Amino acid sequence: MARREIGLRLNGSNRRIEVEDQVLLIDLVRSLGLVGTKLSCDTQVCGACTVLLDGRPVSSCTTLAIEADGRAVETIEGLADAGAPGRAPKLHPLQQAFIDRFAFQCGYCTPGMIMAAKALLDERPHPDAAAIQHWMEGNICRCTGYQTIVEAVLDAADRSRRLP
């Protein structure tokens, strides 16, 4: 099996990592302790493994790690602001909105949902409910019924609008 060194920006930090050519991006990020990204369908259908690659949502279960060479990868762990030592991290407005709106039950799909929603808000900061529903079609949740997810994304958009 061929191995190569890749360089990527992972959650804001530059990393050089040696990987085998066939290693998937989900396996790479999880091997680095970033276990928020979940493997579910393993076929690019459910969205649980969604991460951002250069700001765009991708299914990390079907993306090779070598495709991230020279690119930026953001996982759910990269959203919260770590803050000062000894202080609790400050959650991203999407993370806080999902909590406040009870937009998850089991939580397995939540990291992928939040990452997909972040890409939407980065592209369209003020979406309406229909735009959110359309954008999130690639993310499946078996628990919530989706309405609270849409409400959380709308809430996060509103919170972001009010930030300085």
Image: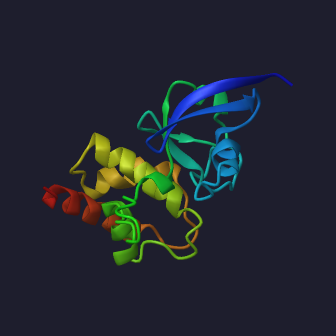
Asked whether the viewer can see residue 134, the reply is no
The reply to whether residue 90 is in sight is yes
* Vertical comparison of 81 with 17: above or below: below
x and y percentages locating residue 100 in the rendered image: 34, 77
Residue pictured at 34% horizontal, 53% vertical: 132
Marks counted in the figure total 0
Q: Position of residue 3 (x, y in %)?
A: 78, 24
At x 53% / y 76%, what residue is drawn?
105
Tell me if residue 119 comes above or below residue 40 in the rendering: above
Q: Between residues 60 and 133, which one lies in front from this camera angle?
A: 60
Q: Observer-nearest residue: 109 or 88? A: 88
Residue 107, image x, y percentages: 55, 70
Left or right of residue 27: residue 99: left
Percent x, y for residue 116?
44, 49
Q: Quadrant of residue 35?
A: bottom right
Query: In front: 142, or 116?
Result: 116
- From this view, report whether residue 63 is shown above or below residue 37: above
Residue for point 70% across, 52% down = 41
Q: Spot the residue most to the right.
A: 1
Q: Residue at x 57, y 25 (%)?
A: 69
Q: Is residue 20 left or right of residue 36?
A: right
Give the position of the C terminus as an image quadrant.
Answer: bottom left
Q: Quadrant of the N terminus?
A: top right
